[in-house]
Image: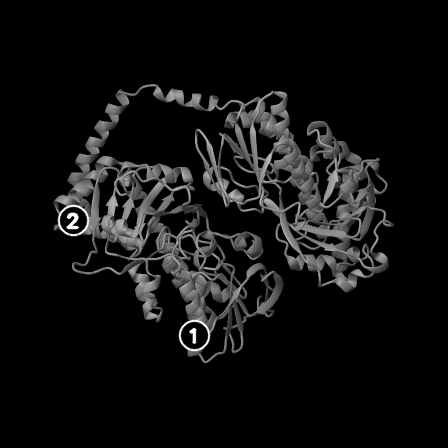
Amino acid sequence: MKTNIGPLKDNDTIAIIGGGPAGSFFAHFALKLAKELNKKITIYILCGKDFIQKGPVGCKMCAGVLSETLIAKMEQEGIVLPTSRIQNEIDGYFFQSQERGISLHHPLPGHKPRIITIFRGGGPRYSLSDVNISFDDFLLNHSASMGAKVLSAIVEEIELPENPQHLVNIVYREEGIRKKISVSLAVGAFGVNTSLTKRIVGKKHGYREPRSIRTCNAELPLGRSYIRERFQRTIYIFSLGIKPIKFAALIPKDDYVTVSLVGNEDITKAHLMQFIKHPRIRELLPEGWSLPENVCICFPKIPVAHAAHPYSDRFVITGDASISRTYKNGIESSFETSRLAAYAAFYHGISEKDFKEAYYTPALKLLAHDNFYGKLILNLHDYITSKKHIANTHIDYLCKHKDTWGAQRINAILWNMVTGNIGYKEIFYDAMSFRLQAVMFPHNFRSSVKMVYGYFRKLTNTNLAGTARSKETLALGPLKNQSTVVIIGGGPAGTSCGIALKHLAKEKNIDINVILYEMKDFEGGIEHNECAGVLSHPIEHIMEDTLKIPFPWYLVKRDIPGYYLHANGQTITLEGNGEISYALRRIQFDAYLLQKAKEAGVTVIKSKVTDIEIGREKIVIYSETRHTSADVVVGAFGIEEGTHKLFESGTPYKSPKYLLSILTKFHPKGKYHDLENTDGYIHAFLSSIKEIEFGAITPKADHYTINIAGAKISSKSMDNFLQQSEVMNQLPECFKDALGHFDYHRGCFPVKPAKNPFGDRYVIIGDAAGLIRPFKGKGVNAACLMGIKAAETMMNVGISKRAFHTSYFNSFYDVIKDLPYARAVRRFIIWGAYYGFLGSVIQIAKSNPELKGALFDSVSGRRTYRRILIDAFSVRLSFKIFAAIIQCFISKITKKQR
């Protein structure tokens, strides 16, 4: 049973991860309570954003509307927003359905609502204003004025203690320097638009992030005078029947109008363009106005459900990453969850049990339970607005019977829905009241009759025009002369694709434009690639025979003839009958391929891609330096880069599931500096440390590359791995003196294919496609082959979804077919290392050539898992392994009894 930690004590320290409203509100309540209880509490706010900056870099990507209930709560706490941070004051709303519109007013006659629009950051990306208008910056400064210490830092690890009496360790990077602090309580206030929920918190302590969808916010520069004249302090709400848009809003600010789109599924830029072109929207925009090329657009995620278990001993999550009101009042939800969490920490305790009882359960009652009614009322609203006759009937009733009880009740329901002034439960019961239904019954009945009549009339006049739709994709044939291909990513996959495209075009005697975007400086040698840097056969043949470029032998630091496999105190030497792998610096190899791509005629642009627009007739790529129109786009980015989010928001693509990896380098000094005298074998470890699935030591010319991998690894995992005796025994004596001074680099690699890695005019290759054999090497080989096959498909088959499926994706069917066998082997190894029976398996392999060969193939990636299991299987061997496992467990039980 866990020990009770009790409430926060005098001289305790709190670290708040995230400087948005949830973090600032928690700091406010915590410092207020500390003062009331006469406790000295130190609070650090670790914030990786500079909210003064313009565009997404300084923004929390929010529509930016403060409800009057939130403003009242803030002012009651002494948080008064200065006029310099206010963009506009809202007097009312206008609701527009597909054919009718109606102005909404506050339910209390004569009451002037206090609704404010703000910018969360420093304003839109291309704004010329030099005034600090950031709402989040104001809240952060308020917390600092109360005594919180704000650090401009990026959190890398949260190490929660196994013993609740121990402190929480937080690893962060400040001004490029890696630091660590120990605190009594860690508060997660990082929202859902971050990788922290997956990469740092993980699932070890039961946390499950809330289900979310992508929305769209765009800032339209319409000018102050036009906005004041046309919008007149009114927010326009739309339900126009554009699928999958659930509802939309035009929110007037100072010089900009914010477009906010929320849907039943992820919103893309195509949906934004469709919305702006709608006649009802064109009526509100200046005549002849079009969306500028340089417009600030983002696709943030919002939660549509609540998180599970957002608390643990000495750790609690508030805001969007915990519990929030569905579709409404996210900032106010952060206010409430932060208040509850702070009161729980000071008055009840900071244990898992305390946070559950005093924070999570009340938050569920306040917000999550109300969301149940929210789903009901929003589904009812979607149904009514999707049926023109019913929606028109309700709006006509409001217009013709303004002063009646029924019209006032419907106005109140709509007003409270758009403002969030009252809970969904109360709105639902107001909408379902018997009196209102009785008043509206004759009107609803007439509209239903009209709707049924219209349906049957449309049914009798159907035609077969829709059958021509499939012809559109058939027109997306092979690339032609002067076609343009854009490749995003300059690693092995992207460069191989570019080189192959140029060679194939030359063979066909046509000229195509291949443009490659890469933001890293490979040639400068200052970038890192979180890869062990081992290339294996047949990479030399792929490059020389297929890509027609020489293999860079001069980059090879040394040959790798085999492996030492370590598990549970046993070691076995694995050799591949002459098959050699090659150790090199990946950054140099990537620079070599990029140079060969340039020599082949590929145009390389050193810039970061900021957005993509995939249309039926062309692709538009936006970057920090220029924009490019193309016929097809190739995504050759890694999983770590944020580019995958652009594809996820603009296409059905979903990035693959992955394992985390951590890599470091050890450069021996003195007499150990030269590694030429070592045998060059890679030491592979199946570690007994629970979260580490495997580790490796790879010798290079003058240093060792050390890496580990696992779903939940952290810097602490690497620390523990390096201190294991079986690891230290493989390294020079001077290694012990270097412990604690290593620089770690994080990465990841796919273990499962991506969803929808291709479509009309786009294809994903490399790690981002996930079409590699998981838990093995040969990632570079697979990347090159994917790039080559994608190029062959575009040149010979076409650029449609069907072409990529039949020619590109199906070429890697053997990888997909091998996945169940890979998962089985992975489970066996994880359990074997943890429970200690892999040592017995290695003992058997020393005298069994078939099993030894299977181990080599598993480590080197020479053959598929399916073929390995089939070739190594025999009844006699299976019986030996089973008997060894049973004996291992019996031995463990006997030792425990002693």
Q: Is residue 32 above or below residue 877?
A: below
The mark closer to the camera, 1 or 2, is: 1
- Position of 346 relative to 47 (above/below): below
| Left or right, 793 with reference to 734 | left
User: What SS does tag 2 mark?
Assistant: helix
Instruction: Locate residue 519, reporting x and y percent.
Output: 58, 45
Query: Would you name the residue on which mark 1 appears?
Result: 33
Q: CA distance from mark 1 to mark 2?
A: 46 Å
Compare marks 1 and 2 and give the one earlier in the sequence: 1
The image quadrant of residue 385 is top left
Give above or below for 675 relative to 550.
Answer: below
Q: Position of residue 348 (x, y in %)?
A: 46, 71
Residue 277, x across and y down, in percent: 32, 36
- Asked whether 733 or 377 is in front, the reply is 733
Which of the numbered marks, if any, corresponds to residue 375?
Answer: none
**Residue indicated by mark 2:** 406
Farthest-out residue, top: 464
Residue 807 in sight here: no
In this picture, residue 398 sits left or right of residue 559: left
Q: Secondary structure at mark 1?
A: helix
Three-letter amino acid code at disc 1? Leu
Quarter holding the C terminus is bottom right
